[in-house]
Image (tube, rainbow, N blue to C red):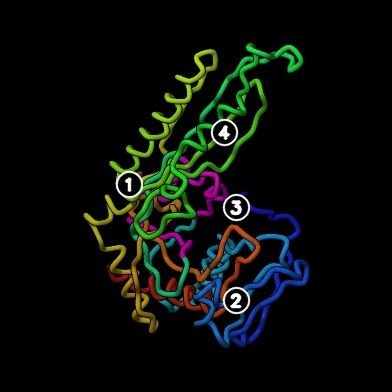
């Protein structure tokens, strides 16, 4: 993920986790503990993988790759295990919204699919955010600051006003949870002559997503009205849609994944995903594609971690799923 440094990753395996705080060799002040990551409390005795403190781990989604390839190796080594034809696709640009090429559904040519891109053990996910991306461009009037009085229009100031005018105590990722959506400004760049803001807009329902887009446009228009010499544009484009809209009409792939979990002794649970997967796009494009757990936690940051035993459980689920699908 581009959200944090991913160069020079040094994985560290903490064998037989004892339930206490985990420290990081390259970042002495960084601490991973059950207080900050409650799921960790359930992993006592597991082997926990982290990075060294200055990078993310990359379990999102190298864990999914490892799970799939381990399952494939097992199937190839055990040809007596029944399964239908299995096709595998790796989409390297999911984190920047370019994971699913328009040709992928035809290339796969499958009845349904699964991504291994989920979190806690047992999660079978069929509901994600619907997502749009927005780019706001502010063009000011560039004049030498020494002679700028009454003439200079600073694009950075206007961009800052847009961010400041948007709700701060609601509608941001840091103030929302559960089924609440948000408007997230993730990039601000430029200078006095021109500045650019990049946003992601998220909601579980399309009307809520549209309302957030309308709010952003209203704020841009209001700031534009305060300074007619500037030009402010707001370009909003769709990214992906909640896979629930399609899967709730045909839950067979979800029920099959749940059955696979139960068959290997795991109780499945389905919660709305405060994010998206390539399965969101695939489902929208006609290939029903729920998401299955890997165990990854605290992704996109230096505290990212995963349990080896959770990955093994996901591998067993994958193998059982292949076996059950052969009887469909």
Q: Mark 4 vs mark 2: which is more N-terminal?
A: 2
Label located before the other in sequence (1 or 4): 4
In the shown orientation, is residue 105 left or right of residue 188? Answer: left
Q: Which mark is residue 1?
A: 3
Identify the element where label 2 is drawn: loop
Crowd rating for badge 3 (residues with CA inside 10 Å; few <14, some 14–19, many 20+): some
Q: Secondary structure at mark 1?
A: loop
CB-based contact (under 8 Å), mark 3 and mark 2? no
Q: Which residue is mark 4?
A: 160
**Residue at image mark 2:** 33
Name the residue rendered at 29%, 71% in the picture: 327
Residue at coordinates 40% horizontally, 75% vertically from top-left?
320
Which SS does the magenta portion mostly show? loop
Highlighted range, magenta: 89-118
Q: Position of residue 218 (x, y in %)?
A: 39, 29
Question: Is 249 one of the magenta-colored residues?
Answer: no
Location of mark 1 (residue): 286
Image quadrant where one finds the C terminus = bottom left
x%, y% of residue 195? 61, 27
Label 4 and label 2: CA atoms lie apart by: 36 Å
Nearer the observer: mark 4 or 3; the answer is: 4
Q: Sequence-wise, which precedes: disc 3 or disc 1?
A: 3
Q: CA distance from mark 3 to mark 1?
A: 26 Å
Sooner in the amino-acid sequence: mark 3 or mark 2: 3
User: From this viewpoint, which residue is outermost toward the front?
Assistant: 149
**Residue 55 spot, x, y in % from top left:** 70, 60
């Amino acid at each position: 993920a581009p959200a944090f440094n991913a160069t020079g990753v040094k994985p560290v395996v903490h064998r037989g986790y004892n339930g206490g705080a985990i420290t990081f060799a390259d970042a002495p002040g960084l601490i991973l503990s059950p207080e900050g990551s409650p799921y960790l409390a359930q992993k006592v005795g597991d082997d926990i993988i982290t990075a060294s403190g200055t990078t993310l781990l990359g379990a999102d989604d190298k864990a999914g790759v490892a799970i799939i390839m381990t399952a494939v190796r097992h199937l190839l080594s055990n040809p007596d295990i029944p399964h239908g034809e299995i096709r595998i696709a790796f989409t390297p640009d999911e984190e920047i919204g370019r994971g699913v090429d328009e040709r992928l559904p035809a290339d796969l040519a499958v009845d349904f699919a699964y991504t291994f891109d989920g979190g806690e053990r047992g999660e079978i996910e069929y509901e994600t955010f619907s997502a749009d991306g927005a780019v706001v461009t502010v063009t000011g009037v560039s004049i030498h600051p020494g002679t700028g009085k009454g003439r200079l229009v600073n694009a950075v100031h206007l961009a800052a006003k847009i961010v400041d005018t948007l709700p701060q105590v609601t509608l941001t990722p840091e103030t929302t949870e559960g089924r609440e959506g948000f408007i997230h400004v993730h990039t601000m760049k430029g200078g006095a002559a021109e500045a650019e803001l990049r946003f992601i807009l998220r909601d579980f329902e399309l009307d809520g997503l549209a309302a957030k887009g309308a709010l952003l446009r209203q704020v841009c228009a209001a700031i534009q009205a305060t300074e007619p010499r500037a030009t402010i544009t707001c370009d909003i484009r769709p990214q992906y849609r909640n896979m629930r809209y399609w899967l709730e009409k045909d839950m067979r792939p979800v029920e099959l994944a749940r059955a696979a979990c139960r068959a290997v002794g795991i109780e499945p649970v389905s919660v709305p995903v405060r994010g998206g997967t390539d399965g969101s796009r695939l489902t929208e494009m006609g290939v029903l594609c729920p998401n299955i757990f890997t165990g990854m936690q605290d992704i996109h940051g230096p505290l990212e971690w995963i349990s080896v035993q959770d990955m093994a459980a996901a591998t067993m689920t994958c193998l059982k799923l292949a076996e059950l699908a052969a009887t469909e």
